[in-house]
């Protein structure tokens, strides 16, 4: 790779290594991961109640190149996004219209409809906790410029529930800094400098948000409740947050599933304080479950979710904040005047323009000529439902057959979005555990997705929003894969190498 040209060439990444160098880096990387809690539980079903083994999380050998200017832009945008979604979550009229079971997505999407209907009933009953906490992640891809122009930053989606991999992403960034400090990557890319590895303190940043909610609740002896999935393999990403809360803030955590909570929690009949077995009050409910219909196999899980929502504890996220993260909301925000509705005089026009420039073209399939337009452009589109967790979208050549079978009434639950086209030819060495492939790194052409974390505490009587941008992650997948989730097996954890493009 030439170093005489200052502009980075994405198609020349990664640098060339000998087999011995690659094997050595892979050994350094995997042993570092195992030594520093960059871990997953192995793919065993059912998971044992007490884990007896762990494997390293899927990871990349090199960090992935990302333009310095766009990394700074993504971090700067997060503050505006934090404010935007705080405002959306408190705009009941907007959420009823877009996501509700009467006029919005909820009337054709049973999962969304169940959540909205439960929230509507609780509103009619009267809510006792106005404060809401969001731990957010905004995801981006590089979009290749035309005529050899530099790439631009384009948003994939905005996550308002169970925004994962903050703690493990911090450890992946540390892993790549370690490989550089230990081996200098065998001088395979001489232009690499220590300042090209940006700091990542996501664990402390996310915990700062949880601690802020706990402090606002202000009850001595209260604990934070993590609502988790049964058999969760990504448990270490959650545990690092728990350890940070205890060690840095002296806040204790309780971890329970919806099924456990059905018998372990109750509400104080007078104050609606959330009390868990043993008489401990809960200050904050942090959902690492509840974002997918499979978390609610029966009506009992919905009942437990609504009991938690009814309580005085601060929810992260509340149901309205979860609904605000819907893909339909993302699409409706592209309509003229919508950003101004929520950001009003709080954000300068230049910042609103930056936000708008980060979006691809989107439209609803229920809009006039929405399906016809999607059919004519299918090869450059992705169709998205109102789901989180990966594996739900429909891409390119699969779109025509899907639309042929989509009942007209269900179109309201789907949006069409122009595909982001990352720079071609970028590669990396990917390492996965739990299989024979774990013995070596596999070179592949890849696509890397940057996520920026932030938190916001809002909903008080003064209308104020406390918010902060708190870190980042990179997930990298083989180019042949449309989906991008690490937990679903499509991607590996990665980090950023800042470059000049």
Image: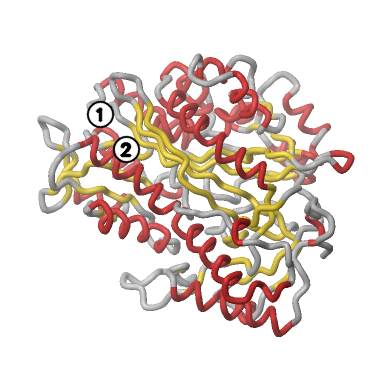
Residue plotted at (13% across, 31% down):
271
Q: Toward which corner of the image does residue 267 lie, by quadrant?
A: top left
Judging by the rendered image, the residue that carries numbered circle 2 is 315
Residue plotted at (58% across, 30% down):
330
Q: Is residue 480 above or below residue 364?
A: below
What percent of the width, then of the height, locates residue 138?
Answer: 55, 41
Judging by the rendered image, the residue that carries numbered circle 1 is 129
Disc 2 + disc 1, Cβ < 8 Å: yes
- What SS does tag 1 mark? loop
| Nearer-the-camera pick, 113 or 61 | 61
For disc 2, the neighbor class at 10 Å (few under 14, some 14 to 19, many from 20) is many
Residue plotted at (68% across, 39% down):
153
Residue plotted at (16% across, 33% down):
272
| Nearer-the-camera pick, 441 or 385 | 441
Q: Name the quadrant of the N terminus.
A: bottom right
What percent of the width, then of the height, locates residue 498?
Answer: 65, 53
């Amino acid at each position: 790779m030439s170093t005489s040209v200052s502009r980075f060439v994405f198609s020349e990444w990664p640098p060339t290594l000998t087999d011995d160098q690659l094997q050595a880096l892979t050994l350094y990387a995997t042993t570092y991961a195992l030594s520093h809690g960059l871990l997953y539980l192995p793919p065993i079903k059912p998971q044992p109640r007490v884990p007896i083994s762990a494997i390293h999380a899927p990871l990349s050998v090199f960090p992935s190149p990302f333009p310095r200017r766009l990394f700074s832009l993504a971090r700067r945008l997060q503050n505006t996004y934090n404010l935007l979604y705080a405002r959306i979550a408190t705009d009941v009229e907007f959420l009823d219209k877009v996501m509700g079971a009467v006029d919005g997505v909820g009337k054709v999407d049973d999962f969304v409809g169940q959540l909205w209907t439960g929230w509507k009933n609780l509103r009619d009953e009267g809510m006792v906790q106005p404060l809401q906490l969001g731990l957010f992640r905004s995801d981006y891809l590089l979009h290749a410029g035309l005529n050899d122009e530099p790439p631009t930053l384009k948003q994939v989606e905005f996550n308002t529930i169970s925004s994962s991999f903050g703690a493990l992403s911090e450890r992946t960034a540390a892993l790549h800094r370690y490989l550089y400090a230990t081996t200098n990557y065998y001088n395979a890319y001489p232009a690499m400098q220590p300042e090209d590895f940006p700091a990542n303190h996501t664990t402390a940043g996310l915990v700062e948000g949880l601690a802020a909610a706990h402090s606002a609740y202000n009850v001595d002896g209260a604990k934070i409740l993590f609502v988790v999935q049964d058999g969760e393999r990504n448990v270490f990403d959650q545990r690092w947050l728990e350890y940070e809360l205890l060690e840095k803030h002296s806040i204790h955590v309780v971890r329970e599933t919806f099924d456990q909570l059905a018998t372990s929690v109750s509400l104080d009949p007078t104050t609606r304080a959330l009390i868990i077995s043993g008489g401990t009050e809960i200050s904050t409910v942090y959902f690492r479950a509840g974002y997918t219909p499979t978390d609610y196999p029966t009506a009992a899980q919905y009942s437990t979710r609504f009991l938690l929502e009814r309580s005085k504890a601060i929810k992260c996220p509340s149901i309205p904040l979860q609904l605000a993260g819907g893909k339909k909301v993302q699409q409706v925000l592209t309509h003229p005047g919508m950003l101004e509705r929520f950001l009003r005089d709080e954000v300068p026009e230049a910042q609103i323009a930056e936000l708008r420039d980060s979006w691809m073209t989107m439209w609803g399939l229920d809009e006039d000529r929405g399906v016809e337009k999607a059919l004519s452009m299918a090869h450059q589109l992705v169709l998205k439902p109102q789901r989180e967790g990966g594996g739900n979208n429909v891409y390119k050549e699969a779109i025509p057959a899907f639309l042929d079978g989509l009942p007209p009434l269900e179109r309201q639950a789907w949006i069409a979005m122009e595909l982001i086209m990352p720079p071609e030819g970028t590669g990396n060495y990917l390492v996965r555990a739990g299989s024979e492939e774990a013995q070596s790194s596999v070179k592949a052409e890849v696509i890397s997705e940057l996520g920026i974390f932030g938190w916001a505490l809002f909903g008080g009587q003064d209308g104020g929003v406390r918010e902060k941008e708190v870190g980042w992650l990179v997930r990298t997948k083989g180019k042949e894969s449309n989906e991008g989730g690490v937990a679903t097996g499509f991607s590996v954890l990665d980090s950023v190498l800042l470059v000049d493009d």
